[in-house]
Image (spheres, grey):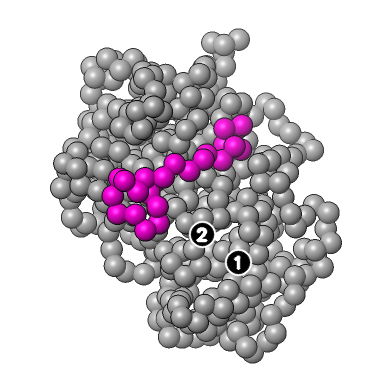
Amino acid sequence: MADTYSLIGAFYSKPSPPLPPFFLKTPKLPLHFPSNSMAAHCHCSSNPRPSQPSLLVFSGGTAFNGVVEELKKLTVRVAHVLPVSDDGGSTAEIVRVLGGPAVGDIRSRCLRLADESTSEALAVRRLLGHRLPINPQQAKYKILEGEHSLWEGVSKPYRETIRAFLAYFQNEILRRPNESFCFSNGSIGNFFFAGARIFFQSLDAAIFLFSRVSDIPAESLVLPVISTNDRLTLGCELWDGTIIRGQNEISHPTNIIGPVDKGRSSVPALPSRIKRVFYMSSEGTNSLHEVFPTVNQAVLDQLSNVDCIVYAMGSLFTSLCPSLVLLGIGEIISSKSCPKVLLLNGSHDRETSGFSASSFVTAITDALNRTYGNSHNCLRNLPSQYINTLLVPKDGEIPIDIQSLSSQGIFDVVIVNSIHDPKVGTIFDPVSLINALGNVVSRYTRTKD
């Protein structure tokens, strides 16, 4: 499109719109939220569907997205728990200039859950999913015109709400004249999300607003594993003692600003396998700078009450483990009697080169037990207390070492139909995966009854 940048327009060409009456007056969208009880305020349904199983899914923002739409057919009662330590792509630029937690993975999952039943819902989803072109010179000072064709189909209340927070985001950028913000490949959804988070000074409130604007089902929760306004930095320790700082440096090192290619790219191998991941201070460089953030209480509340726990496929150490190493997660999972399902990757990546299925189980167990962290906070639970079922994509690369799995107490291994993705290799067939997951939950429910 020749006029791509009229989507956001020159900041000074129109005054920043005030927060619209639609947003300020509706009693369903308060301006202040008690952060510890956000889940209760965000998603209370007047028409609950108890016949649908309730799931909690630990995942990152990419691999599991491909099955979210199919999962809705099984249940919408899903708590999606995501890390907020991603420092790659356009998210990195927002964190660099404005600070705060990374919102890219959360925004990505919210868009996947967004309503598609009306033309306006599709228009909002298309708008918030749009990325600017590469050339930063054209995009740098443009953010608010609202006359691009992508705004077509978006009604005035939604238009004013979205534009208000895009304007607030741009204003925050302009308040930092010593920082040069690069809009290259930037996500409109990330800009909107960041503007809302800074305005409310609450990540939970920003998620709530985004959920309302994109009309996510009331029973579907998108939960940051850590609810914070601070920047979080992920670190990892390799078995050879090397410390790597930053999620992107661990998983997909690149100097390119824009979407991170998480496919089978030619990134250099790690010098040694990963021993553990941990959080470190934003300026830290080694394990002496380790910090211990508190898990989001809403995650613990959901974890205590769901019918099934799922560890999704994706980057093992940078998507799953950042959620699992937090105090309280391992304690609750080990105490529950329910399906605890690992969705095994179909191929190796930089983090899991040479891994077998039992290696994945060991890594998850060590993360939940905090085996290599503070010795005073370590657990000694068995692998079978955290995982009791493996769903494995047919013809995947990861060796299924049945004997080792059996020694870990895991005997339920289900082969699921797969498809070939040219970017990442073997992946689950979404329909077959959700059918298999539904069968696991149903089988457990019948046994329990």
Count of residue discs: 2
Which label belongs to residue 195?
1
The furthest residue to the bottom:
13
Look at 67% across and 56% down and name the residue there.
Answer: 209
Magenta range: 279-302
Residue 435, how many percent across, how many down?
A: 49, 31
Residue 173 seen:
yes
Numbered disc in front, either 1 or 2? 2
* Front one among 161 and 419: 161
Q: Using the rendered view, name the quadrant where residue 77 is placed.
A: top right
* Secondary structure found at label 2: loop
Does the rendering let one see residue 43?
no
- Residue 1 location in percent, x, y? 50, 81
Q: Image quadrant of residue 165?
A: bottom right
Position of residue 55 relative to residue 32, above or below, is above
When asked about the image quadrant of residue 238, the answer is top left
- What residue lies at 46% left-to-right and 47% top-to-bottom? 83
Please report the residue visible at 48 percent of the width from the left and 24 percent of the height from the top.
331
Residue 161 point in image, percent of width and height: 71, 68
Residue underneath mark 2: 100
Between the residue at mark 1 and the residue at mark 2, the CA separation in whole angstroms equals 11 Å
Residue 397 has which mark? Answer: none
